[in-house]
Amino acid sequence: MSQEEFASSLVKTGVERLALLGKHAQALMQGYVGEEVDPSAFSETALKKLQAARILWRSDDQSGLKLSHRVRDLIAEMLADEKRRHVNADVAETLELVRNLVQGYREAQSRGDYLLAEQQQLRLTQEVDDLNSRFADAIDSLWQRLNSDFGFVSSLNDKIRENERAQKQITRLLDGMELIDFDELIQLVDGNGPLRKLLISQLQNQLSSHYTSLREVQSRLVQLMARFRQQQARSLLVNGMVAFLREHPGFQPGNYAKRSQVPDLVNLAAPLHPAAAVALDRSSESDLLAEWVRQLPRRPETSVVAQVAAPASWPEDEQVAARQQKLKQAVEEFYLQVIDSGKVISALEYWQNHQLPWDAEIWLYQVIAEHQGLPAREQNQFRLWQEESPASRWNQVYLIHDVHLQVAPTGATA
């Protein structure tokens, strides 16, 4: 695009956006005086144009339409409205103004001057919106730079300089965001609900969105820089080859496929591993396939493998199984004695009288497990209850001290 075409396009865009300001001046001024702009005052097409021109903006999906800080500053400059005119875009100065407005709002409320308090709250809302709008516009300008200046430079040095400019702008934005101390704001607003929602909830959500956008910008910068370096390396390789061919016009590439030793630069292709599969649908090759199958080595029998591997593990397994079987038999004898006597027998006393070799806890656990393992009909023929006590006063864990077993009377259930 030539300089004249660029200037013509710039003039055309400027005229269209100034015409938008003039056409919707009434509704825009109502938004300047109030807190938000009424979206019903615009058609759907006009609303899209105003947002595309960055005259109106939304901080998020739940908030209403608001004037951008640049348009607000332009109107304040034309009206000589010193209360709303920003001399610069310093974040620290804006935060100091926010502190003064909060103090003025609280003093007006304490005096009962609710009209002044409402005006202070309106100005405070506009200041916070302007602060968020400045961050959003700065991030948008970064995206514009990535899609224009950064993407169309011709040399690596220019690309590095554009990258440094973008990184410095990101650093300035991050430094500005770090000036916003939410602990200080929480103490400043104290228990006031509207101020807490404006300066804590909304501002924190909007700053989180700005941080996310900046991370995306940095990721895009790194990606574009890496891609440009790849393109630069390929361009250098091509330019070097062109220079070599100019110096050696008679150069003819050799047939590397016929060489026994291929240069490493050429031998970069990964080896091919062709896949093969048996064609089962070809009946003519069934005899050959059957012959191949017969030639396959046979796997050892399972029983042989078991005979080879078992001796190392059988002795220990047999000992555990035998010990478990003895414990089960002892419990069955205990149950038989209960049936023969027809009395209540303590499992712990039985364990002590017979001097059984197992631990008392294991013995009681096996007695309970044996009862629970019986069918429901056989369980009803016994009555089992436990001597237990809580482990402490502060939990519901119970410790079992003994188990008593009795044959249930006829007609009774456990």
Image: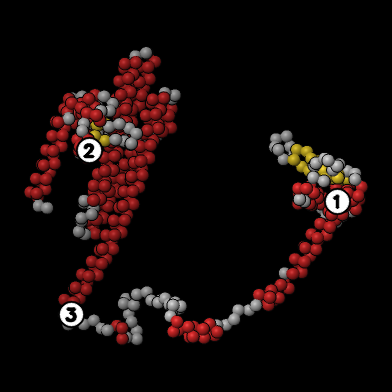
C-alpha gap between disc 2 and disc 3? 61 Å
For the residue labelled by badge 3, is the local secondary structure a helix, a strand or a loop? loop
Question: For residue 137, what is the image quadrant?
Answer: top left
Identify the mark at residue 48; answer none if there is no mark: 2
Amino acid beneath label 3: His
> Which comes sooner in the sequence, label 1 or label 2?
2
Question: For residue 174, what is the image quadrant?
Answer: top left
For the residue labelled by badge 1, is the local secondary structure a helix, a strand or a loop? helix
Q: Is residue 114 above or below residue 350?
A: above
Residue 363 versus residue 110: which sits nearer the camera? 363
Q: How is the image coloured?
A: secondary structure
Amino acid beneath label 2: Lys
Q: Position of residue 135 (x, y in %)?
A: 30, 39
Which residue, given by chain and number where applicable, does mark 3 sit on? 248
Side of 400 relative to 146 (left or right): right
C-alpha gap between disc 1 and disc 2? 87 Å
- Marks 2 and 1: in contact by CB < 8 Å? no
For the residue labelled by badge 2, is the local secondary structure a helix, a strand or a loop? helix
Instruction: Identify the residue at image location x=31%, y=35%.
Output: 59
Instruction: Identify the residue at image location x=12%, y=53%.
Output: 1
Q: Is residue 28 above or below residue 45?
A: above
> Which comes sooner in the sequence, label 1 or label 3?
3
Q: Position of residue 308 (x, y in %)?
A: 69, 76
Q: Position of residue 84 (x, y in %)?
A: 24, 26
Question: For residue 131, what is the image quadrant?
Answer: top left
Between circles 1 and 2, the one closer to the viewer is 1
